[in-house]
Amino acid sequence: MPTVILSGLTASFNQGRLERLLTTAWRIVAVPDESDSRILLKALGDADALIGLRWRGDWGETATRLRLIQALGAGVDAYDQNALPPGCSLCNVYEHGVPVAEYVIGVMAALTMRFGHYDRLLRSGRWDGSGRLDGETHAELAGQSVGLIGWGGIGREVARRARAFDMKVYAIRANPAGFSDSPEELRPDWQGGPDQLEELLGAVDFLIACCPLNEQTRGLLNRRKLALLRPTAYLINVARAEIIDEDALYDALRSRKIAGAALDVWYRYPSKLEERLLPASRPFHELENVLMTPHLSAWTEAMIERRWRVIAANLDALAEGRPLKNVVSPLGTRAS
Amino acid sequence: MPTVILSGLTASFNQGRLERLLTTAWRIVAVPDESDSRILLKALGDADALIGLRWRGDWGETATRLRLIQALGAGVDAYDQNALPPGCSLCNVYEHGVPVAEYVIGVMAALTMRFGHYDRLLRSGRWDGSGRLDGETHAELAGQSVGLIGWGGIGREVARRARAFDMKVYAIRANPAGFSDSPEELRPDWQGGPDQLEELLGAVDFLIACCPLNEQTRGLLNRRKLALLRPTAYLINVARAEIIDEDALYDALRSRKIAGAALDVWYRYPSKLEERLLPASRPFHELENVLMTPHLSAWTEAMIERRWRVIAANLDALAEGRPLKNVVSPLGTRAS
């Protein structure tokens, strides 16, 4: 019977779910505290697969049988792809396009209509922004433009909803040849490759970061690029914080060089839920024009169930000698 | 040259806009303080049309020439339709379906993902709800159901967007024979008349009030009806507060008989923007599960411009002897 390690708390929490979804027989070893390398390394000596939030290069020493490192999400920036054990594949999992797109459209409305601001005021009897009393107006989403950096599962789901809101969709993808030219498939109104980023930045009302964090995208939105955004533009980050330079973003928001932002991904995370930690070095929490959320956009029960169904199917495939799904790094070799 | 009165502040503010949009010649008389009946009654003696937020029965005495009372919005509950001058029509104006639908979808996301709550927590370093740290999950809008009380300009625009979110659409209209059966037009997944309200209440995840306030709808959602909603249901009111019994709504929210609400229309309004006034007798402002906004959902510059275009076109039609648009009460007769 093959063995799978559930590495870390998130994977370990879902042992019951995995048992329910598997159709092949596996020995399941939960290692909730993956920082205890002694236990993890011992378990890795017998393991055929590992499911977890990260892969560290120094874990590979004993992992001679390992054939699958299964990520728990789409982003694989926390997995050292240069140090996969020989013959071991890294696979990721998606299934979060729908809830993240719901978040993106929701925060576009919340930023535009300043829900938090007007709610606070009305609770103290102040009617700023009221149409009944000729308060200040807000903008309509209809007719505005969304710029997607990334045309994957998230970007496409955002685009479909933005279209129903009569918004114009701009999109950039790493490989622009990958845009479909089928008339049946959803296509952006404007599409381009990384070379055309600056053109997109100057043209959009909402800039959405929804691409992987990798060598090409780390620090992509630096001070110079952020300066190309319109002063009325909003930025929404549902990808990884490190795609946007922290100091430049903070300065742009504080000085209102852009109108505002909704940030769901952060520069710092605590190691556990109970730990208190501000999410960045710069005091974003002092800014009124930022909607701050704790990396929640994808976090629905339905999404978790969909992901574990894919994960269980990958273990079943491994047990039965069928090809794996969502392979990011096939048949890893040690870094030379 | 015919004469039009801009009655009250809201209409008076827009004198320049009206002048720009009119293609026929009008004498325009602004009466910013319509509570000064002496001035208004004197002006009404010469007026062919009045544009304003209300019509009071005792204003008709001198209005012998008046042929058009032009409302500034869709709701005509503030216009005494039993006391229109003889030969005078009451017309309303729509054009707000798009921004109100944007609000409705936006607050569905904000209530479901508790933007305000998690933003407050994260600003103090707390990560409740974080998917990275196995916090509590939220629901996906996809697969949930929206129940529309009203299938007019707002209801249809909400439905179109809700479909793009893969939500199921229930709708009730006063005259169910008025639902289109054309396959080209948007149709709800479930449709009914007022008799089927109770069926709808028990079936939906989000209940949207988007119907006129009239004798049939005043107090429509009373304590007994609200009790039919699911405990997980959210209520969104973008129509008029008086459609929902205030005490029953407050009690349902406070005791969590329903999950929450977004309220954009209120039981009390101040007489001017600067006046501080809580929006209800009951302390909704103490509840955490309510998103409170000050009647802002329609209030965009684009919507105002669209409305005044329709209003100017109605004055042009009157001046040129063409039929009026959006006639609510044609050729009023004094109440017998």
Image (cartoon, coloured by chain):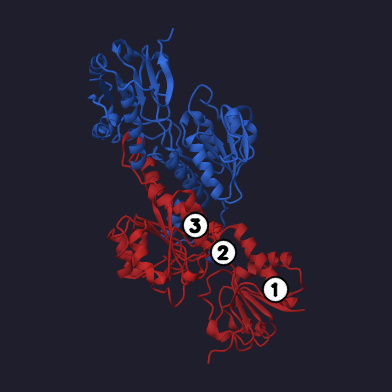
Chain colours: A blue, B red
Single out the mark in the foreground, 2 or 1: 1
Q: Position of residue A301 (x, y in %)?
A: 33, 41
Q: Residue furthest bottom?
A: B336
What secondary structure is marked by label 2?
loop
Q: Position of residue B160 (x, y in %)?
A: 51, 54
Q: Position of residue A113 (x, y in %)?
A: 51, 53
Does residue A52 show up?
no
Check contact, mark 3 vs mark 2: CB within 8 A: no
Callout 1, which amino acid?
Leu
Rendering quarter of residue B198: bottom left
Does residue B239 show up?
yes
Label disc, if present, on residue B158 of the rendered structure: 3
Q: Quadrant of the N terminus of chain B?
A: bottom right
Single out the mark in the foreground, 3 or 2: 3
Check contact, mark 1 vs mark 3: CB within 8 A: no
Kindly identify which chain the residue marked by label 2 belongs to: A
Viewer-side residue, B311 vs A68: A68
Kindly identify which chain the residue marked by label 3 belongs to: B
Query: What residue do we see at 52% from left, 71% from top?
Result: B75
Callout 3, which amino acid?
Val
Residue denoted by label 1: B315
Callout 2, which amino acid?
Asp
Q: Position of residue A193 (x, y in %)?
A: 61, 29
What secondary structure is marked by label 1?
helix
Along the horizontal axis of the image, is A232 left or right of A58? right
Residue denoted by label 2: A134
Q: Earlier in the sequence, mark 1 or mark 3?
A: 3
Rendering quarter of residue A98: top left
Viewer-side residue, A285 vs B93: B93
- Label 1 crowd bin: few (<14), some (14–19), many (20+), radius 10 Å: many
Kindly identify which chain the residue marked by label 1 belongs to: B
Rendering quarter of residue A277: top left
